[in-house]
Amino acid sequence: MELTHLVQTHILEIRTIPEALPYFVTPKVVDEDSPLLQQLTHWAACLITQALEYFTPTYKGHPRVMAYIMRVLKAYPPSRVTFFMLHLIQALRYDDEKLVEGYLIRVAQRSDVFSHILIWHLQIKWGKKVCQRRIQPFWVYCLLLDNTSSMVSVQKLVTYIKESDVYIRCTLSSSKRRKKSGHKEVAPCKIVKGIKVNSGIPLQSAAKVPIMITFDVADRNGVPNDLKPQACILKVGDDCRQDVLALRVISLLKDIFEAVGLDLYLFPYGVLPTDPERRIIEVVQKTWSRSQMGETTDGDLYKIFQQDFGAVGSPSFEAARHNFIISGAGYAVASLLLQPKDTHNGNLSSSWKHVEKRVDIG
């Protein structure tokens, strides 16, 4: 209380300190519509993760608070904001001033990647209603934002239809068994140039029929003809929203480790849902699961390390052991927070450098 009083008393002197924001933008201040909120117009922009906390019902969509959040969002590139798309969709419920709606429309007009991620997140939120009315997600996108005339673009519509058609063709085998299909870009920094013919592989799964397909991709800001393979898993009939949430926590942990200088390793691979029961999963390249290692050798990890990297104490062995320790420690912290249940050797992978990577963490 004393710190809150000090901040509110000296508010004009600390407007350049975004960390002081929680001490004057409180539920009580918002409920009373205090004149203190006028300072938000001049307040230094905080981190996007802090700003999104004010989307909660506690702050009642106060126009000054919402305007401050929009200013913070505009300072970030669309590729960064898409990470928090679900928060923005939820915020539409309290968007009486249509500030969030206007932001989504403006950014979607500038970025096809942003607009397509928005389409499928809307499909996640209202997927069942959409299916019942037989309305395509692109039109749902326009209708829900109530700005059809400004949003409908022939180029965007053609691109969306082409992408959907590609996914439907790719999941034809899975669709016949599960009667569902969908599509979504996994890596916004990549552009799909083609599909490797005959690359489709059905994967083993207890109840689902996932299919792995390899695409030819190029860096969005790189050389257009510099193509590299990127495999993705197309999975239907499975709710992956908890996977998305878990991977967001892992991504935030990764940023925290780097910010405080901790030598811990995490790899938040891409998982993007297209509706509550459809998803595309980024394949983690050049990795082998612990169960696959067991199929090729009878030894334990200690023997596998010596087999792959030489004698104990050699530079290659010690480098591999270091990588294993820092990645194992990083995922230990993440597992403690997330408490994943589906833990088995098939979900524990290791790269050729013996960096541990946990997959299927939902």
Image (spheres, helix red, strand yellow):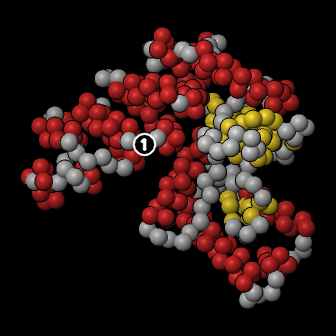
In percent of width and height, residue 83 lies at 51, 42
Left or right: residue 4 versus residue 229 is left
In percent of width and height, residue 36 lies at 14, 41
Residue appearing at x 57%, y 29% in the figure: 112
In percent of width and height, residue 188 lies at 61, 40
Residue 254 showing in the rendered view: yes
Q: Residue furthest left?
A: 9
Q: Which residue is mark 1?
A: 76
Residue appearing at x 59%, y 66% in the figure: 265
* Looking at the image, residue 249 lies above or below residue 224: below
* Looking at the image, residue 306 lies above or below residue 220: below
Q: In this orientation, which residue lies closer to the viewer: 335 or 92?
A: 92
Q: Residue furthest bottom?
A: 313
Left or right: residue 352 versus residue 341 is right
In percent of width and height, residue 245 lies at 55, 46
Image quarter of residue 279:
top right
Q: In this orientation, which residue lies closer to the viewer: 350 or 347?
A: 350
